[in-house]
Image (cartoon, helix red, strand yellow):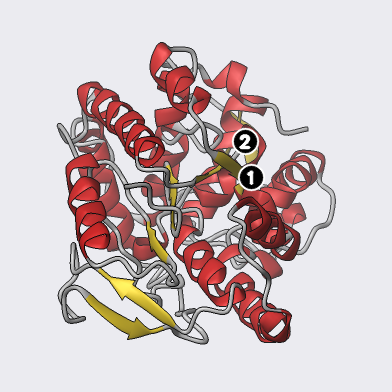
Amino acid sequence: MKLTNMFCVTSLEQLGCTFLDWSIHYLSGQTEYFYTGIRKTEIKPIAWTKLSDNPVKSINAHGHPKNHPHGSDELNLEIKIIKDTNIPTKLYSSYPVPKDGFKGTIKENQYIIEDYIKIFDICKDNGIPLIFVTRYPIDYLMNLRNRDTYNKNPRDLNTIIDYQRQYFPENIKKWNENAWDSREFLAVHIRPFENYLESLFSKTKYMHEMLSKDHYRVNANRLWFDGELVLISILQFLNLKLDTSRLAKWKDVYRNWQENVTIPYSRLSWDISLICQSIVNGYSLDLSSYKLDLYDEAIILHVLLYQYNLNIKSYGLESFPKNTKDLHMILEKNEMDLVYDHLDATKRLKIN
C-alpha cells in the first residue's frame, strides 16, 4: 500500500521542520492532525487532534505535536499505524530522525547517516514524499547554539561550564571556570563554521548515497526568510492545493516564528565579518543590537584567534563592551597554542 496522502520532513539538526510540518497542514486547509502516539504521551495515542492555528512558542514551534519517530524502526511502526487507520481524504505526516547510536563517537555519526539512508528508503518504498531541510557552510553559524539550552538563560555561566564539561571533558581541566576563561576556552575549541556531521561524511559514500536518493531538498535559510515561496513550492510538489484564505494568518505566525526563532540566531551570522573587521581596525560599531551572550563572544574571539592571530586582554572581563572600538583597545597578539584538528581552522574560515 502506497501512502500518497502522507509526507515526511527531516533534517540533520534543528532547522525548523516542526514549523514546516505544521505549515504544510495549515496552508493546505487541514483542520485535524493525526497523532500516532509514538514518542509523546501528552496526547491520547493514535488519535486525531485539532490542528493549532499558531504553534509558535518562545524558542520553537512545538505547539504543534508532530509525529517524531526516532530511528527507522519507529518510522516503520508509525507507517503501519497510519496504514491500518488510513482515511484516504485525510493528510498524514511524520518528522523522523535517526535513533541515537553510540553517544559522542565517530561510530555514532556513521550510525546516524546509515539510519538516515534507511529513512529515505522507507519513504521511497511506501510512496511517501520526503522533504529534507539542509543548509550550506555560509549558514552554519546561524544554528550553532542549541536553542533548548541557551535561549533560556544565555548569560548563565554555569550552563556554559556544563557544556564544556560535556563536550570537552579532558581539556576543561586545564582552565578556570569563570567568564573570561570559559570564553577563551570555547573560542579555542568550538568550530562555528563547520557542521561536524556533514563535514565528516560529505566526502564519503554515506552522504552521497543519502542525498542521491529521491527527496525534495529545502535550503534552511530560504525556509527561514523566504518561507512563503518555499511553502507554495512544497505544496505544489505534494500536489496539495493552497488554501489562500489562510495565507494572511500564516504570514502573521511566520513573522512571529522569525522574531522568536530565526532572526535572533541570524544577526551574528550576517555580520560576523563586519564585527571582527571593526574590532581589528578600530572602527566604531555598536554591538548592543546583537545581544551577545558568552557563547557569541566566544565565536567572535574564535575568529580573532584563528584568522587574525589576535587575542584580547580578557582577565576580569565578564562581558564584551558595547562598541568594537573598545574591544580594539584591548587587543593583543595571540600567544596561545591554538587547537588544530581534522577540521583545520585555517582552511575553514572564509567569512570575508
Using residue 272 as the reference point, say whether residue 340 is left or right of it. left
Whether 244 is drawn above or below 20: the answer is below
User: Disc 1 or 2, which lies upstream in sequence?
Assistant: 2
Count of marks, rendered view: 2
Q: Which residue is mark 2?
A: 136
Give the structural element (helix, strand or loop) at label 2. Answer: loop
Residue 102: horizontal and vertical position, in percent?
A: 15, 32
Q: Nearer the viewer, residue 89 or 246?
A: 89
On the question of residue 251 being in view, the answer is yes
How many other residues sit within 10 Å of disc 2, few (<14), some (14-19) or many (≥20)?
A: few
Instruction: Identify the residue at horizontal 50%, vertical 27% (top origin).
Output: 211
Residue type of the residue flagged with mark 2: Tyr
Using residue 304 as the reference point, say whether residue 316 is left or right of it. left
Using residue 47 as the reference point, say whether residue 12 is left or right of it. right
Residue 49: horizontal and vertical position, in percent?
A: 32, 84
Q: Which residue is mark 1?
A: 219
On the question of residue 338 being in view, the answer is no
